[in-house]
Image (spheres, grey):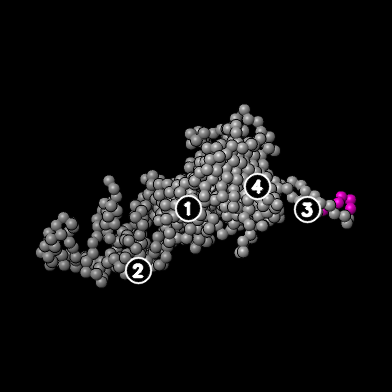
Amino acid sequence: MEKKQFQAESKRLLEMMINSIYTQKEIFLRELISNASDAIDKIYYKALTDDKLVFDKDSYYIKVTADKTSRTLTIRDTGIGMTKEDLENNLGIIAKSGSLAFKKENQSKDGHDIIGQFGVGFYSAFMVADVVTVISKSLYEDSAYKWESTGAEGYTIEACEKDSVGTEVILKIKDNTEDESFDEYLEEYRLKAIIKKYSDFIRYPIKMDVSGKRLKEGSESEFEDYQEEQHVNSMVPIWRKNKSELTPEDYDKFYAEKHYGFDKPLKHIHISADGAVVYQAILFIPESTPFDFYSKEYEKGLELYSNGVLIMNKCADLLPDYFSFVKGMVDSESLSLNISREMLQHDRQLKLIAKNISSKIKSQLQSLLKDEREKYEQFYKSFGRQLKYGIYSDYGSHKDVLQDLVMFYSSKEKKLVTLDEYVARMPEEQKYIYYASGESNERIEKLPQTELVSDKGYEILYFTDDIDEFAIKMIMKYKDKEFKSVSSGDLGIEVDENEKDTDAEKNDNQALFEHMTSLLNGKVTHVRASKRLRTHPVCLSTEGELTIEMEKILQAMPN
Ligand code: ADP
Ligand code: MG
């Protein structure tokens, strides 16, 4: 027998897990069942794509058995199993490293959100069990192995007997403590309820031996004891169900079960398409930004199923970058099981699905904007920047899709507004859509350059994100109105006093202006008298395409 320590990271994460993360301990069952289902997916997929393997659909199932005398709960599956190496690699280390480091840097936040963003599924068993034993036989190895652990101390591995391929996870359920009872995890009715609650749509049968008393056949008063094996779950995947049968909670549960995020989804999109291309999809717009969203580590993509069998975890081709925050899955009968990653990229069906999905996401965002403004603003705070990047990227080729979805803070409304709303409010004589760039709304408000425009009663959009002005340059015109920075030389506003005044001032002060220009040698092109200021003595303005803010950003960029 070999005894091994968990890797240091896993050890600490494990402790954290057990002590704090999940407030609902019952989800351990969801986690173990979902692992079992994943393992069956793998062997099922293998059987469908490999002629040498013949399997009968009935041989795929998950069985949950509770034994009160030994206080054990067993979750057995007929999945692909684990080799000795798999047991060490998959159950000995928490796969996504770096997560703990991240957690440390963000101690101030409560563990909840962050932890939820990486799978710690298997370890949740330790919330209810003192000892976890895994007996597994892999499809790829002749001997079976037993992995056992009592929690943070480490684990042992030894060879053992097991006839059929698959895995058994045996939990030694904790004894009750003064303030907590664990007995419920050995109760049939309770286990059934948990399975119904979280794992109803699992595609394989989840079986349980159920016992009880019932009326004897043919009798009206005599009872008999019985024990029978029941299918606990309805087995219809949620995406195949009719939308009308599903509640918002069903979608929320699916989101949590799939680890799409630890937040609640802001909106779900359930698609059942049967036009040119047949597919079902359940997509989610998350509420909060995943911690790695704006980093290189973030991987976009949707789960891809072919007729109910998972063929890819993150199919990136299904989502454009600007909608990379969308989570979810797609199931299509039109895709071949044997399709490789390379082939997928060129698959016509997949392209059609991707296009269709994008337009659905767009229209859902638009209706969110129209009908549930607050939710939209919340969405926009989390992912608005991604939309603006989307406008800027690929030379503005996606601006038509995205320009109606972006928002900026408005000087008049004191809140986020869309371009459409801005233009609709413009007085007839106003020529441009005005904007001002700066670090924050407060700072922009104090800019001398905003005075003239504000005095005219015109609305100004505040650009506080680096990307804002670059994105706007790609849009160029919105509903035929061009954008104009308040710091540009020509604001297109008629000043009340006639221009000759300025000329006079210019002539009178010619010597002063020349002196100032030479003092600011090379820093300014010229110094001029201006009618645009009210309470401020001077301001900087620019000519040409680049504004001062854009120049600052470009200069700060690494070459
Ligand atoms: P995740 O499911 O997010 O990968 P888990 O902690 O739930 O993380 O599981 C870790 C890994 O252990 C899985 O990815 C899988 O490779 C392996 N595993 C867990 N349970 C089983 C099982 N019943 N059969 C086969 N492999 C399993
Ligand atoms: Mg899991």
> Does ligand 1 reach within 8 Å of label 1's beta carbon?
no
Label 3 element class: strand
Indicate the amino acid at tag 3. Answer: Gly
Mark 3 vs mark 4, foreground winner is 4
User: N-terminal of the two: label 1 or label 4?
Assistant: 1
Label 2 element class: loop
* Residue found at the far top of this picture: 52
Indicate the amino acid at tag 1. Answer: Arg
Q: Is the magenta stretch mostly helix, strand or loop?
A: loop
Residue toward you, 189 or 338: 189
Could you tell me if the residues under marks 2 and 3 are in contact, i.e. CB atoms within 8 Å? Answer: no
* Residue at mark 1 to residue at mark 4: CA–CA distance: 26 Å
Residue at which label 3 appears? 212
Residue at which label 2 appears? 457
Indicate the amino acid at tag 2. Answer: Gly
Residue 141, quarter of picture:
top right
Mark 2 vs mark 3, foreground winner is 3
Q: Count residues near mark 1 (Cα–Cα under 10 Å), then give few for <14, some for 14-19, many for 20+.
A: few
Could you tell me if the residues under marks 2 and 1 are in contact, i.e. CB atoms within 8 Å? Answer: no
